[in-house]
Amino acid sequence: MQTTNIDHIRHSFAHLTNIAVRKFYPKAQPAIGPAIEHGFYQDFGNVKITDADLPKIEKEIRAIAKLNLPFTKELWPVKKAVDFYKKEKQPYKVEIARDLVKEKKLTKLGIVKTGDVLVDLCRGGHIKNTKELPLDAFKLTRVAGAYWRGSEKNPMLTRIYGVSFQKKQELDRYLKTQEEAGKRDHRKLGKDLGLFAIVEEVGPGLPLFYPNGALLRRIVEEYITTLQETKGYQPIWIPHITKGELYKISGHLDKFDALYPPMKLKGEADYYLKPMNCPHFMMLYKSVLHSWRELPVRWTATTTNYRYEKSGELSGLTRVRALTQDDCHVFLREDQIETEVNLMLDMVQEVYGRFGFKDFWVRISTRDPKNKAKYIGEERIWRESEHILSRVIKKRGWKHELGVGEAAFYGPKLDFIFRDVLGREWQLSTIQLDMNLPGRFKLEYIDEKGEKQQPIVLHRAILGSTERFLGILIEHFAGAFPLWLAPEQIWILPISDKFIPFANSVAEKLKAESKENLRIVVKSENETLGKKIREGELQKIPYLLIVGERETQNKTVSVRTRGKGDIGQMKIEEFLGKITAELNQRKSAIISINQR
Amino acid sequence: MQTTNIDHIRHSFAHLTNIAVRKFYPKAQPAIGPAIEHGFYQDFGNVKITDADLPKIEKEIRAIAKLNLPFTKELWPVKKAVDFYKKEKQPYKVEIARDLVKEKKLTKLGIVKTGDVLVDLCRGGHIKNTKELPLDAFKLTRVAGAYWRGSEKNPMLTRIYGVSFQKKQELDRYLKTQEEAGKRDHRKLGKDLGLFAIVEEVGPGLPLFYPNGALLRRIVEEYITTLQETKGYQPIWIPHITKGELYKISGHLDKFDALYPPMKLKGEADYYLKPMNCPHFMMLYKSVLHSWRELPVRWTATTTNYRYEKSGELSGLTRVRALTQDDCHVFLREDQIETEVNLMLDMVQEVYGRFGFKDFWVRISTRDPKNKAKYIGEERIWRESEHILSRVIKKRGWKHELGVGEAAFYGPKLDFIFRDVLGREWQLSTIQLDMNLPGRFKLEYIDEKGEKQQPIVLHRAILGSTERFLGILIEHFAGAFPLWLAPEQIWILPISDKFIPFANSVAEKLKAESKENLRIVVKSENETLGKKIREGELQKIPYLLIVGERETQNKTVSVRTRGKGDIGQMKIEEFLGKITAELNQRKSAIISINQR
């Protein structure tokens, strides 16, 4: 059986939304209504609609669909179409018609009729009859505001979103994933778990982190820093601002859109907040002489960059204006590319295994062979490094796609796209070869013959940014972080005040005897045990240890684990052994990644 | 025997400098010539003098002094003085004369003659005769540029500095200290030891740190962070920028001079780089409800602030524009002040003991009792907290001074002034009570009765700023950091390539068997042992371990310690025991501070 094109179905639902809305709100002025991922939307001017109005509109759409109306297309002379929409008081359609004429020099315009009900200016892509619409796989979802043509200078329109699929099961699966994603929303969990806040007076996209959120940042960042050190990367430190001169050299001053405007000082150069670290790294490398023996110079810094993203595009931790990168720049010789890329791949594999993201693929971006002139750097290095990047990925058996023509103008790159527990894809790690900045900054090293050579630079980030990574991590784990990541790992709950001393002694003993620097809180507040347990569960604490009369006498703890509840009484040493094993398991969990 | 007033001696030397310079450069136009700490200076316009000219000028001063010229003072009518200086082409003296008349409504001006040689407009403070000048305790030291009246709008003058004391021994001691300070100059050592760089294209006052400098920062900052955590302080994380609105609330927008100018965005509020952390802390506290039970809330952040200091005032790490503070804000109830201040004092004592600054005193700054109106906050809290600050310092027997009238308008404070190994004083730690910001930000907690109360805030920094503290630390230790602080603690030097495997195995063994996370470098470069040892000494590495045939066979290392040289061969375990003891000694070194 042939199925109807899903985009035609979705776009046809937009037409029906147009009809249904104007039944209730005759003065509504329809604008555009395209098919999008998972569904469609339809914009209207001159109307006020809220989520509460959606059920009646949806009901009306279903009713119209059941009228079995045919979609028919006609070609009208431009004047007829414009006059029609003027008469109908549909100014957005008039504007679209005029623009079509202006841009494409059309003399006739495509008009789509739905039965006799709607006459719509439309480029087409419809089903044949409303009876084809899978009504059990359709739903209106929400109302939002949207500027006409996406510009803040234009009027704000009302946008109705709907979802639509071929089959009911697809809709059900989609809605379930959405519901789950909603529960896992890191903005909600960030608040519930006391991780971070976005504060009006400080500004959008600039989260502040409470102690537990700051601790989560540190655990993640210190893990990366320590790992990097064991691999021979050295942290440096750079300030967050610079004279504009630095970005003149790097070229960012002209080309980087998200640069914050300058701080204008009297009698001094303009200063800028750094939106990326590369130029600072280049200058520090340049400030001393380097011999070929020292290369590769592997420098890293976990430092915050500031990018002026539009406020409408900001969201929780995943789209911010302050982004802390685990940034690394390696200055190397041509013969060191493969070794260094492999070292980076080892780290990517190690890190994502630890965090439990096992499902990923790699985009290998190379030059457009038809337009080689737009790339800078030596042909030999391009050819060689493109081969190396392909070879090392294939050798590991990692799933990949070739992005021909998607290389940066300064070199080929690898991007790593990970899939979270809900199946959503996130681009995180990146490895980029750079033949541009070393030239712009006139970087050098002295080769074996005592001659000056230009090093190549490899850029690399593993997490991408701490903020975005934490956002993803919170949703991936739904806030129930594995033991090694949990800001608070263990709560000890004395049944009454009488057992606080024993609770404290358990905490001391665990801390003293573990090598793991355990994060333990004794909950000595004067509350009922039931309330403390509920609070611990809401806060998604991995272990709750209850201590009362029996535990004090036996030198034991009653253990509740997250998700499972009570797992019984055990000796303190036994509990310590259990969590040590859990933490060490993490340590040896170098994953065997999906070899697809 | 009565000694001559040292300031009179110094000022008299300035007069003789005036005479001597004009002998060689008759068109030089003298400006001011005051006594200062350790000596004097004399400014001149219309002349070019360099350090190379100082010996001849100094010789001439000595010759003039030996003429036994008397200093005599006369009163001249204003017109006579002005006419005289006009005729003599001394425009700065003319300007001084006119200003004196304008400001003080003088009709006669004090003129000082040195014999018949110099007629100088001067407020006095001289010796009687040049024969009193202690010529063996005098020296011209350097030439510098200085703006007339300190303003960049005025002409640049030439300033000659001299030092002068009562006795030769004092001069010798001063010169020796200066020489030592020069050798210890952190700007020079910072370069020699590869710690940091100040880069023209990034800007003055914005140091970038090489790996060893970044590591030194981290060792210091992590020590403080960990110590704070054991004392119940919790790190938070805040962004480096904010809307101006935050500083409107705090009052900094109008009153804080060193604020960088705003970043002006279209259609959005102005953003500012943060010059201090308090307002961000206040907002984060305010973003959730607090109960009296939670207090004290002890929050800390090691985060960089940006202050626009004049470029002429910047110097290495000690005067920077990017300063990273170990900042802490405690939100507390009135009844918690003493406990919290004591906790802070414990930390100050602990930290400075560890770093080896044992010599310090405290300034206790209280209100001016005659002008109570200029302070805000409740009289009761002022009285009580002033008493507490005095009491806790006295109880510890710490040397202190009362700074009556030196409190901030928002509360009393404690400043800690430490003396380094050269006897120079540095104000580092500060503890300040604040009754202002909690009011401006309308901070609250819910008290036992369920009513809203305003908390008090204590500000506290221990190191002051990481950058300045490191500058002081580098000079205090002359770059020879104690083992626990040294970025590179141990170098292992194989005598030839043949012994590199054994050198690596020693490094592995030391790292594996120590709990201290040792920082070891194996120097496997193809260089002579002598060259490697010299390099290790220049880099002030605490331990150099030499391994060759004998060591490989005996499983030993030949140990050289910094400053002492070869201390013989020892088993690896023995060496490990030695350095572990050295590191642990540091750990238990809670000092008994000078109880003067």
Image (cartoon, coloured by chain):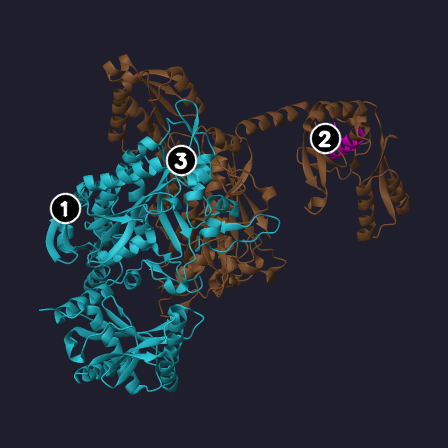
Chain colours: A brown, B cyan
| Mark 2 surroundings: few (<14), some (14-19) or many (≥20) residues within 10 A | some
The residue that label 3 is drawn on is A211
The residue that label 2 is drawn on is A49
Q: Nearer the viewer, residue A48 or B478?
A: A48
Q: Main secondary structure of the magenta part?
A: helix
Q: Secondary structure at mark 1?
A: helix
Q: Secondary structure at mark 3?
A: helix
Label annotation for residue B331: none
C-alpha distance separating marks 3 and 2: 41 Å
Place residue A335 in its image quadrant: bottom left
Q: Residue furthest top?
A: A550
Position of B205 relative to A31 (above/below): below
Label annotation for residue B578: 1
Chain at tag 1: B
Residue A509 horizontal side relative to residue A470, left or right: left
Q: Secondary structure at mark 2?
A: loop
Q: Nearer the viewer, residue A381 or B282?
A: B282
Was residue A15 drawn as part of the magenta stretch in this picture? yes
**What kind of residue is marked 2?**
Ile
In front of the other: label 1 or label 3?
3
Find residue B529 and report its horizontal and vertical position in percent: 19, 62
Marks 3 and 2: CB-CB under 8 Å? Answer: no
Chain at tag 3: A
Residue pictured at 54% horizontal, 48% vertical = A364
